[in-house]
Image: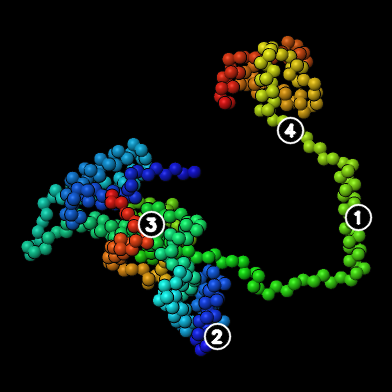
């Protein structure tokens, strides 16, 4: 086995034992290689799982990697057992989260001006769920708190990092595409978005 | 506890306005302000009856709409070079609505993403202590010390057993006034008039006397009984007020 193969195989075992997202920096330090190199090896490993259509996949959250199931197998997992479902967010929480995700760092006043309604309670709820956090204070009058999204947000919504979010202008295309994709794949459940 | 009243499906004033505009099949760039303002205010009026606070938040936009409506009535001046038009009074609102709509779209996207992620499962981190190298702790004892310790243990056990044999822990029964009242009510089923001594029964402990007396006072307060004492330290006579007693009974059920 080449050295690269050895390290990759070790990373695979480490991820298995660790369970939680394994930081590529932590993994790199074990082999005394630099983070970039470790990151690339993780990406290679991730690719191998993808191309072999494995039931276990590797996902990336903020340069950390974690084993997870392939989303297409959800139906069968649910037949086997009932995994704990996180409670889904309310419509208003989703709107506030959307604004924070794209405008961060952002003050409460800015969020409220976009939605035209007070958001204190919603912001409180999102902080409690660890989806957003205070990231500092604005230099403006009164030095209001600035909010940003957390790692949990990336994890729960399936983004590698903030750059992984689609561009604002592309959102409607992304939604359309995924709707078409869902219709084509019989394994997936179509999500109906009720028209108001 | 805060109760949140949700009115239809509108998340805020802009949400309502966007709905009204789309419902009327108007272009967002060419809002018929008079018509939309009318509909908007109608809705807020209805809302006011349910939740005045929430309606208040919608009121600000109603005021903005009215302001725009009045500005629309003014003749729009054309500037001197005959080219540039004065700014459309609606444009600021349109900008805001467009921005809001954009974020609504993002929210829908995030919702979809959330739904997708719920189909992906991971294992929580397990207890890793089995992998960590905890050295076992050995007891550093010689045989004599061990025997001593064991003897001590046996002795302590013996004493404990002896104590358990001779003593019993007696728990005092604590009856509540409510319980006592129930008992007293029972007595009144047979007789309408009882002496305090009769409801007290055989147990003349201080605890029981006080409890019974307090229960009697409570029944008096509820007007379920009438109490008479003709001379100081004389016998207390309690007469049941059947109507009230029955009513209280009904309330309790």
Q: CA distance from mark 3 to mark 1?
A: 67 Å
Please name the residue that numbered disc 4 is placed on. B174
Q: Is residue B53 left or right of residue B159?
A: left
Mark 4, secondary structure of its residue: loop
Q: Residue furthest left?
A: B82
Kind of element beneath mark 1 = helix
Residue A152 vertical position relative to residue B68 in the rendered view, above or below: below
Instruction: Measure the alpha-carbon separation of dots 3 and 2.
Output: 42 Å
Circle nearer the viewer, 3 or 1:
1
The reply to whether discs 4 and 2 touch (Cβ–Cβ < 8 Å) is no
Q: Is residue B59 above or below residue B136?
A: above
Number of residues whose C-alpha sits closer than 10 Å to that of mark 1, classed few (under 14), some (14–19) or many (20 or more): few
| Tag 3 residue | A94
Q: Is disc 4 in contact with disc 1, using a CB cutoff of under 8 Å?
A: no
Q: Which mark is residue B155?
A: 1
- Parent chain of label 1: B
Q: Position of residue B91 (x, y in %)?
A: 20, 57
Label 2, residues with CA under 10 Å away: few <14, some 14-19, many ≥20: few
Which residue appears at 68% of the width and 28% of the height? B179
Indicate which label's residue lies in the foreground, 4 or 1: 1
**Disc number at residue B51?**
none
Chain designation of label 3: A
Give residue A112's position: percent from left, percent from top: 36, 55
Q: CA distance from mark 2 to mark 1?
A: 60 Å
Which residue corresponds to mark 2? A32
Element under label 2?
A: loop
Give above or below for B207 relative to B15.
above
Check chain identity for marks 2 and 1: say if they share one. Answer: no
Residue at left 78%, top 35%? B172
| Residue at the extreme top of the image, as rendered | B230
Q: Nearer the viewer, mark 3 or mark 2?
A: 2
Q: Is there any visible trace of residue B37 in the rendered image?
A: yes
């Amino acid at each position: 086995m080449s050295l690269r193969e050895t390290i990759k195989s070790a990373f695979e075992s480490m991820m298995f034992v660790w369970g939680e997202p394994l930081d590529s920096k932590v993994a790199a330090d074990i082999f005394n290689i630099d983070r970039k190199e470790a990151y690339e090896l993780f990406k290679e490993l991730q690719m191998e799982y993808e191309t072999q259509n494995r039931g276990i996949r590797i996902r990336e959250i903020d340069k950390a990697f974690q084993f997870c199931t392939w989303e297409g197998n959800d139906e069968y997992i649910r037949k086997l057992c009932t995994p704990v479902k996180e409670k889904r967010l309310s419509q208003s929480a989703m709107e506030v989260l959307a604004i924070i995700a794209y405008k961060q760092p952002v003050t409460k006043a800015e969020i409220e001006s976009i939605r035209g309604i007070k958001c204190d309670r919603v912001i409180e709820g999102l902080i409690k769920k660890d989806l957003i956090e205070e990231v500092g204070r604005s230099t403006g009058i009164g030095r209001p708190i600035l909010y940003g999204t957390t790692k949990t947000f990336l994890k729960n919504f399936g983004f590698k990092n903030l750059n992984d979010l689609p561009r604002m202008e592309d959102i409607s295309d992304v939604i359309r595409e995924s709707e078409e994709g869902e219709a084509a794949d019989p394994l997936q459940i179509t999500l109906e978005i009720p028209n108001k | 506890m805060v109760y949140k009243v949700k009115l239809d499906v509108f998340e805020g004033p802009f949400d309502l306005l966007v709905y009204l505009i789309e419902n009327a099949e108007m272009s967002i760039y060419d809002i018929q302000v008079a018509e939309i303002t009318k509909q908007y205010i109608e809705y807020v009026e209805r809302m006011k009856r349910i939740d005045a606070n929430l309606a208040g938040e919608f009121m600000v936009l109603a005021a903005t709409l009215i302001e725009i409506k009045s500005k629309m009535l003014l003749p729009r001046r054309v500037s001197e070079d005959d080219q540039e038009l004065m700014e459309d009074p609606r444009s600021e609102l349109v900008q805001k609505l467009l921005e809001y709509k954009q974020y609504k779209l993002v929210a829908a996207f995030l919702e979809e993403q959330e739904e997708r992620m719920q189909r992906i499962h991971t294992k929580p981190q397990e207890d890793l202590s089995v992998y960590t190298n905890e050295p076992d702790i050995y007891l550093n004892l010689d045989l004599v010390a061990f025997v001593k310790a064991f003897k001590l243990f046996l002795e302590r056990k013996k004493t404990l057993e002896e104590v358990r044999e001779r003593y019993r822990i007696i728990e005092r029964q604590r009856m509540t006034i409510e319980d006592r009242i129930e008992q007293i009510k029972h007595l009144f089923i047979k007789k309408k008039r009882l002496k305090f001594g009769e409801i007290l029964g055989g147990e003349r402990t201080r605890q029981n006397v006080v409890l019974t007396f307090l229960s009697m006072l409570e029944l008096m307060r509820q007007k379920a009984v009438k109490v008479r004492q003709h001379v100081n330290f004389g016998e207390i006579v309690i007469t049941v007020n059947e109507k009230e007693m029955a009513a209280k009974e009904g309330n309790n059920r």
